């Protein structure tokens, strides 16, 4: 089975740098509490690492 990442935004983007806001938007996150499921790739891991202080990540089987 392919692995996926469930990414949930836990903190606000207010007072964060523009590149971090853009990264959250590219992941598909707009609001606190919103979750998205993304494929577990190196690129998505990099996005998550860049905004790790704003999101919570779970590995799921999809």
Image (cartoon, helix red, strand yellow):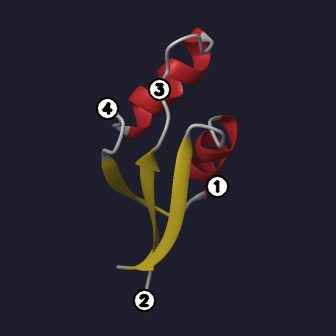
The one nearer the camera, 10 or 28, is 10
Q: Position of residue 29 (x, y in %)?
A: 36, 36
- Local packing at callout 3 (Cα closer than 10 Å; few below 14, some 14-19, many 20+) is some
Q: Which residue is mark 4?
A: 31
Marks 1 and 4 sit apart, C-alpha to C-alpha, by 24 Å
Q: Nearer the viewer, mark 4 or mark 2?
A: 4
Q: Residues within 10 Å of mark 2 (few under 14, many from 20)?
A: few
The residue singled out by tag 2 in the image is 1
User: In what element is the residue under mark 3?
Assistant: loop
Q: Quadrant of the N terminus?
A: bottom left
Q: Secondary structure at mark 2?
A: loop
Q: Nearer the viewer, mark 1 or mark 3?
A: 3
Query: Most extreme residue toward the bottom, as rendered?
Result: 1
Q: Residue at x 50, y 34 (%)?
A: 11
In x, y percent, where is residue 42? Answer: 64, 55
Cβ–Cβ under 8 Å for marks 1 and 3: no
Earlier-in-chain disc, 1 versus 3: 3
Q: Quadrant of residue 52?
A: top right
Q: Quadrant of the C terminus?
A: bottom left
Residues under labels 4 and 2: Cα distance? 30 Å
């Amino acid at each position: 089975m392919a692995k996926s990442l469930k990414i949930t935004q836990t903190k606000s983007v207010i007072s964060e740098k523009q590149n971090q806001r853009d990264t959250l938007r590219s992941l598909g996150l707009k609001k606190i509490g919103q979750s998205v499921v993304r494929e577990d790739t190196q690129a998505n891991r990099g996005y998550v690492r860049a905004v790790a202080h704003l999101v919570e990540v779970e590995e799921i089987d999809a």
